[in-house]
Each structure stands twice: as C-alpha cells, then as structure tokens.
Image (cartoon, grey):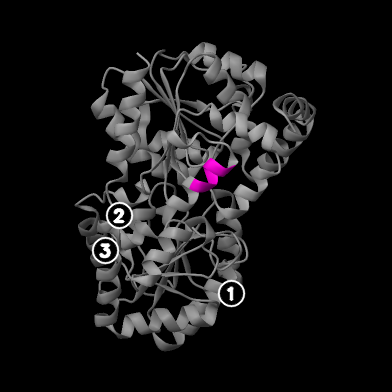
Amino acid sequence: MNRTLYTLLLYLAVPVIAVRLWLRSRKAPAYAKRIGERFALTLPQFQQGGIWLHAVSVGESIAAAPVVKALQQQYPDLPITVTCMTPTGSERIQSMFGDSVQHCYLPYDLPLASRRFFKRLQPRLAIVMETELWPNHIQQCARLNIPVVLANGRLSARSARGYARFPKLVAPMLKQISAFAVQSQVEAQRFVDLGARPETVTVTGSIKYDLQIAEDLPKQAQALREQWQADRRHIWIAASTHEGEDAQILAAHKQLLGLFPKALLILVPRHPERFESVHALCIQQGMQVQRRSTHAPVSAAHQVLLGDTMGELLFLYALADVAFVGGSLIKHGGHNMLEPVALAKPTLIGPHYFNFLEIAQQLLAAKGIQEVANSQQLAQAVSRLWANSERAQQMCRAGQVVLERNQGALQRLLDIIQAQLTGHQ
C-alpha cells in the first residue's frame, strides 16, 4: 500500500470515524465536542513560526511536559503549540500548561485537513512524541521544509511487524523524518530496518527517567494523611487500572483487609469514563468508598478511596506506602512505573508490561520493582512489603539507582532539537 491508496482508504473511512466518535461520546461526552478541529474546519488563531509538538494522549502528554517546559525556557520568543487526539489528553495539556501554550486536537491525517492545519500554524519545527506517525502530516512537513523530530521514540516488536506489512507507505515516510531520538538500540535498529536513514537515528534513552518531582509533594501528602488521621494506616495504590483489573485488585484488597483490617486502597482508573462503573463495582463488592472528587476527608470506616480526578496521580502515589501500576494484569502493556519509583514507593507490576519493556526489565533486574501474576500474588506482595519495611526500603533504593543511572535523555533530545532549529533558519 502506498500513500495514495492509504489516503483513499482514509477518506472512505470518514463515515466510520464519525460513527466511532459518536459511540465514544456516549461514554465520554467530550468526544462529541470540538469536532471541527479534528477536520481542521475550526482552528484557533495561532501565532505562527514556532514549535509544534504532538502527544497523542495522556501518557505522551505527561512524558512531553519536561520537553515543553525546557523549550519554553530555552526559546521564550517561540510560540509552542501542543496537539493531542483525546479529550483526556487535552484536559491534561490544559491543566499542565494553561495559556502558556497554543492547543487544539491534531486533525485527522487527510491531505485537505493537513494542508489547512499547517497553513494556519506554519511551524518552524515539528516534534512528535513516541510513535505517533501520520504519512500525510509528515509529507506536508516535508513539502513545507519543516523538520520533523521523533522524540522519545519507541517501537515494539509487534508495532514494527505491523509497519513492515506496508513498506511502500512506511519507508518513504520514515525517510522524510529529520531526526529520531529513540529510547534504545533495539528500537533504533527497528526504525532503520523499516526505512529510516541511519544517520538520522540517535539513541538518547527515555525522557521518562528525567522525571522531576515537586519538592513539597511528599510533605503535602503526609499533611493530608495526618489530617485524615491515617498516618499510621496501611495504604496502597492501584493506579491507571483498566477494565478487567479492578475486580482483581478489589479481590486482593479483601485478602489484605483480613490481615490489616484498617488498610486503605487508593483505586485510580485510567480513563474518566470508567469512574462511575468502578465506583459501582466497589459498592457491589461491599466496600466503603470515598470519592476523591468530593475532597471530603477519608475516615477510618473507608476502605477504598476512588481517585476520580485528573492530574493528581503523582499526589495520590505520594499518599500511599506501596504502589501497583495497572494496565499490566491484563494484556494492555502496562503504564509508567517510574512515577512511583521516583517517589520512593515500593512498586509492583503485573506480567503484561510490553509498552515499557526496557524500563521494566532494568528495574526487575535490579530488584527495583516486583512482578506479580494475579490478585493472590498481589495481596501477598503488598502484605510482605507492609510487614517488612527493610525490604520495602531496599526495593526503593534499587529503583532510584536505576532512575538516576538513566537520566540525561532530555538534554540529549534538546541538543537534537537545537541542531534542527539552527539548521533550518
């Protein structure tokens, strides 16, 4: 399949895309809003000549935060535009950056929409986070002589196999990208095998290691625990959970309540559209639940705190003694385990962590995190960490060593961005 056929199929798929948006909007009403942006029919009035950065959803937006902040400091005169594809990503971008960046949804990869978008924005540089590659957008950048940097690039074996099925579409697109800043040597080779020019590919490591924790965050969390009279309570968090995991986590919590009757679980679903169903599940399981969105205190009677707010995950991690990172008990691929590690929390993951394979493997090898296969093992691991503070501290120290050893990717990426900006003045 070449780009012409891809474009034709994409135009034919527009009715399907519209139906999918409508179906998603039934669960998450935000999908029914700002449709014009998705087709570049209604776009904000942009300041032109700046840097455009695309982060598909919440995870990429969080990873992009240190990049955006560093670019704002380094290039205060350049307007920065951050795009995404999901309402939760949009909400996170607006809460992190407010009016300091320009923001809209990235239009679909249709040539007419792409032309309208780039005509309105006219950036000097394009930065795409991780693996969000769209042939027509990249073709448009090449046509307008806008250098494209793939930042924090990752490419799993599975994704590489998928791309390899369309060499006539993928290879020309990858050749048009000016610079790849990728997370590992294995991924660098995958991009080259698919058609990237070897001289454009650099292994920078993952910028996720360059995570900055606000100094006062642990103090704020401790103050809230004291306010709840929970400073001596056993608290654990199950974060970024997906459908199929919550019941397993609640089963583990029931086991823990048998051993630690005052234990508190902070349960944080990944997607806001699931807040209600997870709340209903907790009640169905006979749990006493408090919702974080009410900002009401957690009492001794509460067994679960439902993290039904956005932008508070690091704070909720800071409240807990032990962390479990979701998306990993089911075959979703896991989420960023470096956040609880950076907060010095003993961290557990399930067996499905292929989205963070290299990071997880390093942490597991150093005994900086622990893998559990099911709810029973999860309960056992949490109870052992609560019972053995020395073991918990060893795990935290090992995780911090891995974190510190891998830092520096952000600066390497910024050097690549600077070279592209100065080379295309």
User: Which percent across, then down, holds residue 422?
Assistant: 31, 19
3 or 2: mark nearer the eye: 2
Q: Is the Cβ of the residue at disc 3 closer than 8 Å to that at disc 2?
A: no
CA distance for labels 2 and 1: 42 Å
Earlier along the polypeptide chain: callout 1 or callout 3? 1
Q: Residue at x 27, y 65 (%)?
A: 225
In magenta, the rendered stretch is: 189-193
Q: Is residue 154 visible?
A: no
**Residue type highlighted by circle 2:** Asn
CA distance for labels 3 and 2: 10 Å
**Which residue does the numbered mark 2 point to in the structure image?**
406
**Residue type highlighted by circle 1:** Gln
**Which residue does the numbered mark 3 point to in the structure image?**
400
Magenta span: chief secondary structure: helix
User: Mark 2 packing: few (<14 Cα in 10 Å), some, or many (20+)?
Assistant: some
Earlier along the polypeptide chain: callout 3 or callout 2? 3
As drawn, is 40 to the left or to the right of 128?
right
As drawn, is 124 to the left or to the right of 86?
left
Please say if 148 is above or below 162: above
Residue 285 is tagged as 1
Please say if 154 is above or below 257: above
In the current view of this chain or complex, which residue is farthest to the bottom?
A: 259
